[in-house]
Image (cartoon, rainbow, N blue to C red):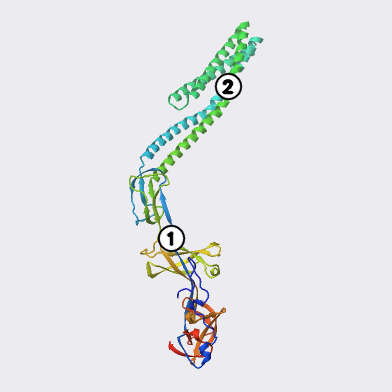
Amino acid sequence: MKTGYLLGTGLLLAVSLSACGRGGGGGAPAPQAQANETVAVSVAVERIKTGTLTETASVTGELQSFNDTTVAAKVGGRIVEVRVREGDRVRKGDVIAVQDPTDLQLQLRQAESAVRAAEANLRQAEIAARTQPAQTDAQINTAKAALEAARARLHALQTGARPQERQQAEQAVAAARANFELAKANYQRAQQLYQQGAIPKQQLDSAKTAFEAAQAQLRQAEETLSLVREGPRREDIEAAEQAVRQAEEAYRQALLGKAQDELAQQRADAARAALQQARAQVALLKQQLADTVIRAPFDGVIASRFVEVGSMAGGGTPVARIVTVDRLYFEATLPEMLLRDVKPGMPVETRVDAFPNRVFLGRVEAIYPAVADQARNLHIRISLTNPADLPLKTGLFARGEIRLREYKNVPLTPKRALIEKGGVTRVFVVENGVAKQRALKVVATNTEFVYAMGVRPGESVVVRGQDLLSDGQPVRILEQ
């Protein structure tokens, strides 16, 4: 059964039973009948049958694709290959077009070289950061020992030597000689590492400074021992005082070397960040290089192609339009009064003008949560699966019938028998050649019949000529 609802630009509802277009007298006696009540009025009748009445709502809309996307170039470049035409089916990941990758390939090689250089800089910085604290401590210890030795020498010169001081001077010489040998070995090892490129020049200079300081310390210790043995002179005392001042300054400078430890660590951190940045640039260029191959984002059909081989395509330039046609949908307008009747999941029989003899089964997928206009209509979305031969196309005008309710084994009264007046629905039932007026209580309706209380299956109702009847009017049946 077709619906009794025709819904607005997408949906129009006919809830009254005035479709018959009759403006009958509703039982008022016709003037001619009053003059001669024995005159029979010619009428056509139709017998009320038992059947099934399906109450539906009509919906209309334009078929649309769930996925309708214009694929665009992500990077700029000349198109060197186009692999699709309008109407081609593509799978997700299929190549649509290819851009010239030459410039990006050159940039990628440069970026990879920058990564290798950054890795080498990081290795050197990390070595310096690990060894710098030990060298700084060695320099501090060396400077501190030299200061103590200078002070001891000055003290020895000023106070004269005692047996215990002579012994201490000898021990100081032995300690200074041991420190000198260690500093010498460290310096020689640093020279080898620098020649191999394993340490920076700054680290070699630090080892050299430590070596020279140890050498000076040894000389001072030997001179102190000599003074202890020979006794001081005035000029020796003055020289020792000067040596103390120099040793104090050297110790202060050595303490300032602690700041170099932090700088070395900062240089290592900076080298590490530079390496990360270089690697990120490589990753970016690799992604851009991959983006020169433009691929389908989903399964679908090429609806439009916008580029040709040789054309330039910048970032964002449309390349092709892809739509899916396996599943389609259309939006329709639902009157507020039908909101309680229409539910998601309800079946919808859909037809298109291109295939008038085919019915495509869909369903109500969603009822939108807000009213669409001042009339408080709502929008609904109806989805349907395209058959295997894919006859449905986007843009086709679709008409759907939503099944609201179904009444089985009920009396079906033809709608053309109805008389509407004053909000009351009536029919004329013919009994023994006489038309008798009946008031009906309409339960449900569609475009052809109504299911109403007040008549029974098998009764004959007047479907033509009822405008001339009054209650109890004799009739002559011309057509049944």
Residue drawn at point x = 63 percent, y = 13 percent: 165
Q: Is residue 387 above or below residue 87?
A: below
Which residue is farthest bottom? Answer: 38
How far is mark 2 from mark 1, CA to CA? Answer: 80 Å
Amino acid at dot 2 = Ala
Q: Earlier in the sequence, mark 2 or mark 1?
A: 1
- Seen from the viewer's position, the closer of residues 242 and 404 is 404
Residue drawn at point x = 64 percent, y = 14 percent: 164
Q: Is residue 271 above or below residue 409?
A: above
Amino acid at dot 1 = Gln
Q: Nearer the viewer, mark 2 or mark 1?
A: 1
Residue 233 in sight here: no
State which quarter of the image contains the C terminus.
bottom left
Helix, strand or loop at disc 2? helix
Helix, strand or loop at disc 1? strand
Labelled disc at residue 64: 1
Residue 111 in sight here: yes
Q: Position of residue 338 (x, y in %)?
A: 53, 69
Task: Give the residue at mark 2.
Answer: 254
Q: Position of residue 339 (x, y in %)?
A: 54, 68
Q: Position of residue 427 (x, y in %)?
A: 51, 84
- Seen from the viewer's position, the closer of residues 372 and 451 is 372
- Seen from the viewer's position, the closer of residues 316 and 218 is 316
Quarter of the image where one finds residue 284: top left
State which quarter of the image contains the N terminus.
bottom left
